Image (tube, rainbow, N blue to C red):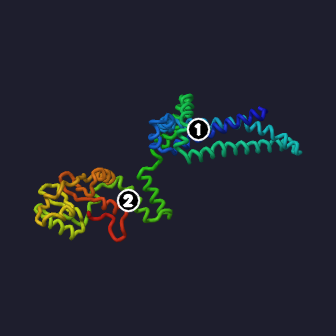
Amino acid sequence: MSNPWVVVTATVAIIALSAFFVAVEFALLGAKRHRLEDAAPTSRAARAALRSSNELTLLMAGAQLGITACTLALGAITKPAVHHWLTPVFETWGAPLWVADVAGFVLALIVVTFLHLVVGEMAPKSWAIAHPERSATILALPMRGFMWAFRPLLRWLNELANRCVRAVGVEPVENVEGGGQDPATLRHLVEHSANVGALEASYRVQISGALELETLTVDALVPEQGPPTSVPADATAADVRAASARSGHLRILVENGSVVPKVVHVRDTLLEPDDRPARELARPSFVLESGTTVHAALARMRESSEQLATVMDGDRFVGVVTLADVLRRILPRPDEPAVALVG
């Protein structure tokens, strides 16, 4: 093929196809699934990207097949043409035929490799990484069409690759699980960053404490220094105020003869006579099972506008926790323990 315009047009088309397959590959690996799900109801392209994320290894097989085909096409069309054009140029400079032929071959290989590597791979890869959801959505529909046309071949190639992977004891996955950003992975990244000096120790404590809320249960936050502040069932408003003054706590437990105590806020007693029974001012406490995770407990307390919760292990009273206990777990002060008494 000696017509320069035909060669240039074919080369541009091949490099564009290679860039397409590279961008598809990196875009879907970097795209956040929840963002694609948010756009799916109103975007056909986002739905197509979601379908591709559910058959990740098949898509990777398609992308690799496309990139390989483009590489072979450049080697079969562009490199020989450039070699053919350059060899006479070196001959006109007085070089022997064999020297001109070798120089033309090497320079053609360098030119084609440079174009394919920089324009056909590195540039689209950088774009896809910088805009993963946008690039995944833009490229999803044409990629689904390619996968539909070559699906039997892709399934066969994918099965061969999966057998190789299983042979070394690894089970291949078919979808994107979220980019490896689960709590365990993030905790490992935080510890590593702190160990190499990239993250201050104070920030490590805060971030690790926040990640721990996914698995930490509320019974672990129950104070160990003693029982929470409480008054007997026959206590009066004056007793509640006195207990609050001694402990500094605003919410006081009132024993009511049952397993689950009630709660009275000291402000509800300020305008009451000293001899007003505390049980008349108390209300049922907000109950959490001891195995409830702190993350779930926070959500339930926020929905109920509760500041204090009673922790129960079946019929056994474990203790109480407050929002302040959770905050002190995440942001401990130097002069107090990470887990504080209820307040």
Nearer the camera: disc 1 or disc 2: 2
Q: Which mark is residue 262?
A: none
**Residue shown at the point (21%, 63%) measured from the top left:** 267
Amino acid type for the residue under numbered disc 2: Gly
Amino acid type for the residue under numbered disc 1: Gln
Location of residue 136 in the rendering, given as x and y in whole percent from the top left corner: 53, 40
Task: Choose top left, top right, bottom left or bottom right for residue 323.
Answer: bottom left
Q: Residue 336 or 160: which is nearer the viewer?
A: 336
Residue ID for mark 1 = 64
Location of residue 137 in the rendering, given as x and y in whole percent from the top left corner: 53, 39
Measured Cα–Cα span from mark 1 to mark 2: 42 Å
User: In the orientation shown, which residue stands out farthest toward the front?
Assistant: 271
Residue ID for mark 2 = 209
Location of residue 202 in the rendering, given as x and y in whole percent from the top left corner: 43, 65
SS for dot 2: helix
Quarter holding the C terminus is: bottom left
Q: Residue 280 or 247: which is nearer the viewer?
A: 280
Q: For residue 240, say whether it is visible.
A: yes
**Residue shown at the point (46%, 56%) measured from the top left:** 189
Q: For residue 162, say whether it is visible.
A: no
SS for dot 1: helix
